[in-house]
Image (cartoon, rainbow, N blue to C red):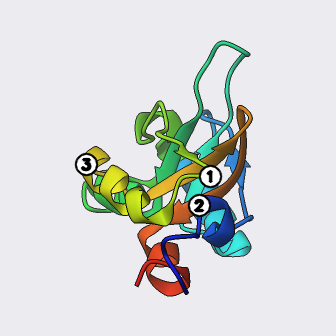
């Protein structure tokens, strides 16, 4: 694949799964497993709010390693907010730099103010950059 002509939109996953911040980590785990995803987007509470994100890494680091019960931890306690979206037309050569500088491994892809997919280091590696 020629990385000089591919954008985030070309290699992103279209599987964009949402969850409410008041849901529990147990619900998030179940949703991630059933949908086969590594991250969930947290819904906005209102039009002026920002999206959040919770990843498998967040759940492991902030729930399991701390020996907390997933059914007693709300998503808003462990999520990252606001998300750092990747523009849909950003060239994939720059996406890994952005993600490394922002210290994130998964990001939603945004086009015209709407989230349209998700991109990760895994998708960059398997589908485009290397």
In the image, 42 versus 75, the foreground residue is: 42
What x and y, as percent, mark residue 4?
Answer: 49, 71
What x and y, as percent, mark residue 109?
Answer: 62, 50
Identify the image quadrant of the N terminus.
bottom right
For mark 2, give the secondary structure: helix
Q: What residue lies at 54% left-to-right and 52% top-to-bottom?
A: 90
CA distance separating discs 2 and 3: 17 Å
Contact between marks 1 and 3 (CB within 8 A): the answer is: no
For mark 1, give the secondary structure: loop
CA distance separating discs 2 and 1: 6 Å
Which disc, if any, is residue 101? 3
* Quarter of the figure with residue 44: top right
Residue 116 in view, yes or no: yes
In the image, 118 versus 33, the foreground residue is: 118
Q: Which numbered disc flags the more N-terminal residue, 2 or 3? A: 2
Q: What residue lies at 31% left-to-right and 56% top-to-bottom?
A: 97
What x and y, as percent, mark residue 101?
Answer: 25, 48
Residue 6 vs 45, above or below: the answer is below
Which disc, if any, is residue 89? 1
Residue depth check, mark 2 versus mark 3: number of the one nearer the observer: 2
Residue depth check, mark 2 versus mark 1: number of the one nearer the observer: 1
Which disc, if any, is residue 63? none
What x and y, as percent, mark residue 98?
Answer: 35, 50
Q: Which residue is mark 2?
A: 8
Q: Which numbered disc flags the more N-terminal residue, 1 or 3? A: 1
For mark 3, give the secondary structure: helix
Circle 2 Cα neighbour tier, 10 Å, few/some/many (<14 / 14–19 / ≥20) = many
Q: What residue lies at 47% left-to-right and 43% top-to-bottom?
A: 73
CA distance separating discs 1 and 3: 19 Å
Contact between marks 2 and 1 (CB within 8 A): the answer is: yes
């Amino acid at each position: 694949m020629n990385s000089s002509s591919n954008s985030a939109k070309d290699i992103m996953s279209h599987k964009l799964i949402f969850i409410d911040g008041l849901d529990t980590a147990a619900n998030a785990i179940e949703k991630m497993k059933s949908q086969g995803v590594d991250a969930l987007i947290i819904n906005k509470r209102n039009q002026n709010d920002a999206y959040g994100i919770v990843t498998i890494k967040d759940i492991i680091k902030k729930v399991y390693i701390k020996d907390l019960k997933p059914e007693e931890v709300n998503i808003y306690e462990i999520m990252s907010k606001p998300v750092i979206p990747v523009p849909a037309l950003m060239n994939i050569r720059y996406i890994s730099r952005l993600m490394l500088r922002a210290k994130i491994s998964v990001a939603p892809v945004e086009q015209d103010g709407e989230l349209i997919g998700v991109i990760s280091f895994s998708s960059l590696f398997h589908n485009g950059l290397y």
